Image (cartoon, rainbow, N blue to C red):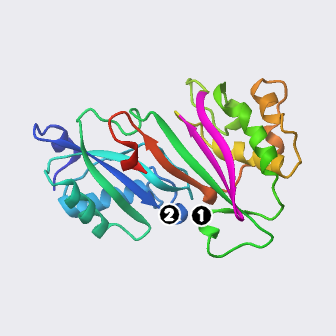
Amino acid sequence: MTSATDIINDEQASRVALVTEYDGTNYNGFQFQTNAPTIQEKLEQAIFNFTNEEVRIRGASRTDRGVHAKGQVVDFLTGTSYSPEIWTKALNYYLPNDIKVKGSYAVDLAFHSRKDALSRTYVYTILNDTTPSPLVRRQSAWVSYKLNIDAMREGCRALVGTHDVAQFSVRLPDGRSTVRSIKKWDVERVGNLVYIESQASGFLQHQILNTNGLLVRIGKELESTTVVDEILRGSIIRMPKWGPLKAEGLCLQSVEYMDIPQREIR
């Protein structure tokens, strides 16, 4: 067995990045926890089963309990020299059916999946129908009231730009900035499914779920389309009056990097 320390001290060590996809229903989030199953634990166990190496992986996003991913990027050091194709095939052999590697890439030793990410894109899926569906219940939230998509889009406009988004988070980072640069926040309806897409350099904890919860209230015409702008400008404090949406509707769609083509990480 090769320990993480041995790998770090190995002059022949290389760094591998994985693009992963997972159904987060049965996991207590991405980040390792001692007494609960996590995505990180399963990935590290699969790597150990294949290489006999104890590695510590780093993820682009620490997705919360129940959140899914189509394009989560992770990286780790290894003392082995397998091809990307072998990494993908071997790890998928050892991984459970609800976690898979979509692609493997040899990256620079200095690559950091979290710190090097330019932006992260999340999509929240809502089943907007009079009755719930067992076919999409694990990857969507159910809202029976017909949503006003135009009103939700109007509410989204204030979100794009650089703002202090502290009021949309449940836990503020210790001593760190709560200002975030949001590139996109938009709503689209396709049949009875509503998709809310969010892209930013980074998000605070539960920021997306809280913000989308407010957008749903706007879609139900329970809030004005100007409420988001009023909150961001600090003229009203309203967040405690509504709860976040459920985690199962949220999916990390992709992560953007300077040196990894976007088509490879979707």
* Magenta segment boundaries in residue numbering: 180-200
Q: Is residue 174 above or below residue 35?
A: above
Kindly check if marks 2 and 1 are in contact, taking CB atoms under 8 A apart as contact: yes
Query: Which residue does the numbered mark 2 point to in the structure image?
Result: 23
Query: Which residue is at the front of the view, 197 or 60?
Result: 197
- Number of labels in the image equals 2
Residue at 61% from the left image edge and 46% from the top image edge: 197
Q: Label 1 crowding class (10 Å Cα cut-off): few <14, some 14-19, many 20+?
A: many
Q: Main secondary structure of the magenta part?
A: strand
Residue 181 magenta: yes
Residue 176: where, in percent of width, then height? 55, 24
Amino acid marked by disc 1: Gln
Q: Is residue 95 above or below residue 257?
A: below
Amino acid marked by disc 2: Asp
Residue 244: where, in percent of width, then height? 72, 49
> Quick one: quadrant of the N terminus?
bottom left
Mark 1 lies on a secondary structure that is: helix
Query: Which residue does the numbered mark 1 point to in the structure image?
Result: 139
Q: Report the side of 148 relative to 50 (left or right).
A: right
Residue 182: where, in percent of width, then height? 60, 32
